[in-house]
Image: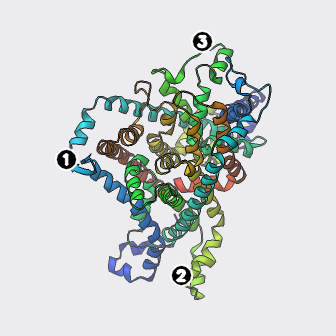
């Protein structure tokens, strides 16, 4: 992080800093963005907190204290929704890590047309989420879906499976679509990490006779650690928030078996018009996310020091 | 590298090529499937078992989405919204990235980390208040309203990407310009800005793609049919009981194609920017 800032000024008093010509100039440059972010981020956040303590009656909001939170905590759906959210987030992030690192390692080898292949492997990431949801739904179609055809062709299943209407399977079907959609980001991050590893480490390991899995375990993974941490935290946060697949593929069904937190917040508000309840759940969700955000900022700071 | 590659047996190398080929097929298949489904005869879509390659090609679905739906209108809306979002985000992020990248001021670290973290705020926490806010200022069902809301998505990472690029400018270059008597604004526009043009390109692609694929804000804030963007317009082909799969896949292909093409041409810039925006502390 090479910047203009001279580090001694950190210890100066506020008055000294305000007298310094630089200070005001920098502030003017960031001010428009800060103001806009205040309006579109801080205000909504405060407003959601406020809404979570109120209930709509006609056109009026009535203060109800913690009642919305109590209603959420006592609801019969909360346990299931949290279970699904953890399953969806955990498995999707884990698989994105595995596929991402495998893909990055393949892309880090030499072959013809590598840049083009890398571009193709990134395509899922620029595919709009709603398009991903709809095409996977079409591929999962119980009668006309191409997935069932491939699976029966190679003899893995002998009858056509209704992937998205089976409560035991639906969430895994959505997770597979989520891995497809999201793995390229991990792949690119790991690829950047791999390319910055000092090749002498591999040469040394090779001379010591370390086989490929030992090189992976003792050189690649430790060297990638900082990138891994940031990437896994970032994908965890994004996946936790990401619900267009659930929304468009199953709507949370069948029988609530794919309902996850953000989808529940959205449908409570815009299908059932329970804004207070929805806001309370949104704030609970936000508090859970805060934990990850703190870890993310900490991981970034550490990395800043290491670099 | 050479030591490792020499140690790879011919068998291993062949296995690696096969793996790369298989992965390419699997990864691109859903996009290929959108295209294949969009050019099949209507009755060929509904055979069981489904045919993989169409025996007869038809453009019927494309004709129907153009004449029987507002698809072209949705396409136009998407282009307007994504372009405006890109423009406004860049304008904000270019200034802010320079401010945070090149100056120290009270609270610089805290505010810049706040902006970085804000990209992780759940959309659903913001959506109800933003809906109220836009409706109070009569900006529901308007391009300005949606673009304004999209800044939540695009400004944070755009700012951080550009901050990284500005940090790469050697301090001496700016100092020399100041000694020559250039005003701060001219140092910025005449010296710093031209040096981060690749960063601006990366940020622009990023903002455009984000705005192009966004779904929930568009779904919630644009309820008039003639103002819908492509992602929301797609839902028009999904009925309560049945889905017009052929038309839906044709419309999906129209939605995917522009960003994918843009991206494949410009991926080099984009990759640089994303990696630096997400990792650099």
Badge 1 density bin: few <14, some 14–19, many ≥20, Cα 10 Å: few
Q: Look at discs 3 and 2 and give the one toward the viewer.
A: 3
Precedes in sequence: disc 3 or disc 1: 1
Q: Farthest bottom residue?
A: B181
Label 1's element?
loop
Q: Quadrant of residue B57?
A: top right
Measured as percent of width and height from the top left, residue A301 is found at 44, 56
Residue B70, above or below A35: above
Badge 2 density bin: few <14, some 14–19, many ≥20, Cα 10 Å: some
- Chain containing the residue with disc 1: A
Viewer-nearest residue: A167 or A24: A167
Badge 3 density bin: few <14, some 14–19, many ≥20, Cα 10 Å: few
Residue B226, above or below A267: below
Cα gap from disc 3 to disc 1, whole angstroms: 54 Å
- Chain containing the residue with disc 2: B
Residue shown at the point (44%, 43%) measured from the top left? A241
Viewer-nearest residue: A36 or B274: A36
Residue shown at the point (60%, 46%) measured from the top left? B230
What is the number of callouts on the image?
Answer: 3
Cα gap from disc 3 to disc 2, whole angstroms: 71 Å
Q: Which mark is residue A65?
A: 1
Q: Which mark is residue B184?
A: 2
Cα gap from disc 2 to disc 1, whole angstroms: 51 Å
Task: State whether residue A301 appears in this view.
Answer: no
């Amino acid at each position: 992080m090479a910047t203009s800032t001279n580090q001694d000024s950190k210890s100066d008093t506020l008055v000294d800093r305000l007298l310094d010509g630089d200070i005001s100039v920098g502030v003017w440059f960031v001010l428009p963005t800060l103001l806009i972010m205040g309006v579109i981020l801080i205000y909504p956040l405060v407003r959601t907190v406020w809404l979570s303590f109120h209930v709509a009656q006609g056109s009026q909001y009535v203060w109800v204290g913690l009642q919305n939170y109590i209603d959420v905590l006592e609801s019969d759906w909360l346990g299931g929704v949290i279970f699904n959210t953890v399953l969806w987030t955990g498995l999707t992030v884990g698989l994105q890590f595995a596929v991402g690192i495998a893909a990055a390692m393949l892309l880090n080898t030499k072959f013809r047309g590598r840049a083009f292949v890398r571009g193709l492997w990134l395509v899922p990431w620029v595919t709009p989420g709603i398009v991903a949801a709809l095409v996977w739904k079409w591929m999962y179609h119980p009668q006309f879906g191409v997935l069932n055809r491939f699976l029966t062709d190679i003899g893995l299943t002998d009858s056509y499976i209704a992937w998205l209407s089976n409560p035991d399977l639906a969430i895994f079907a959505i997770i597979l679509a989520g891995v497809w959609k999201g793995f390229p980001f991990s792949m690119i991050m790991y690829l950047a990490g791999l390319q910055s590893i000092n090749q002498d480490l591999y040469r040394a390991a090779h001379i010591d006779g370390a086989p490929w899995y030992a090189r992976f375990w003792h050189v690649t993974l430790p060297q990638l650690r900082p990138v891994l941490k940031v990437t896994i935290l970032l994908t965890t946060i994004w996946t936790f928030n990401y619900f267009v697949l659930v929304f468009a593929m199953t709507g949370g069904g069948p029988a609530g078996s794919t309902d996850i937190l953000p989808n529940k917040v959205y449908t409570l508000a815009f299908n059932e018009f329970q804004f207070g309840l929805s806001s309370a759940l949104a704030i609970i969700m936000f508090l859970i996310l805060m934990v990850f955000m703190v870890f993310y900022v900490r991981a970034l700071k550490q990395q800043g020091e290491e670099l | 590298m050479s030591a490792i590659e020499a140690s790879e047996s011919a068998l291993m190398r062949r296995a690696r090529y096969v793996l790369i080929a298989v992965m390419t097929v699997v990864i691109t298949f859903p996009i290929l499937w959108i295209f294949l489904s969009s050019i099949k005869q209507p009755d060929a879509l509904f055979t069981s078992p489904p045919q993989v390659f169409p025996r007869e090609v038809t453009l019927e679905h494309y004709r129907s989405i153009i004449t029987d739906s507002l698809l072209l209108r949705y396409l136009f809306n998407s282009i307007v919204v994504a372009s405006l979002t890109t423009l406004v985000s860049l304008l904000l992020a270019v200034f802010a990235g320079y401010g945070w990248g090149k100056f120290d001021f009270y609270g610089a670290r805290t505010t810049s980390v706040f902006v970085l973290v804000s990209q992780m705020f759940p959309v659903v926490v913001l959506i109800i208040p933003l809906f109220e806010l836009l409706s109070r200022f009569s900006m529901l069902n308007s391009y300005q309203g949606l673009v304004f809301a999209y800044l939540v998505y695009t400004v944070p990472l755009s700012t951080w990407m550009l901050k990284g690029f500005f940090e790469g400018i050697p301090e001496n270059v700016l100092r020399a310009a100041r000694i020559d008597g250039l005003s701060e604004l001219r140092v910025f526009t005449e010296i710093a800005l031209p040096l981060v043009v690749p960063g601006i390109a990366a940020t622009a692609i990023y903002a455009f793609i984000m705005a192009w694929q966004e779904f929930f804000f568009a779904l919630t804030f644009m309820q008039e049919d003639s103002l819908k963007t492509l992602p929301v317009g797609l839902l028009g082909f999904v009925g309560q009981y049945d889905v017009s799969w052929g038309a839906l896949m044709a419309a999906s292909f129209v939605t995917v194609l522009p960003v994918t093409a843009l991206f494949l041409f410009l991926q080099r810039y984009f990759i640089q920017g994303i990696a630096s925006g997400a990792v650099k502390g």
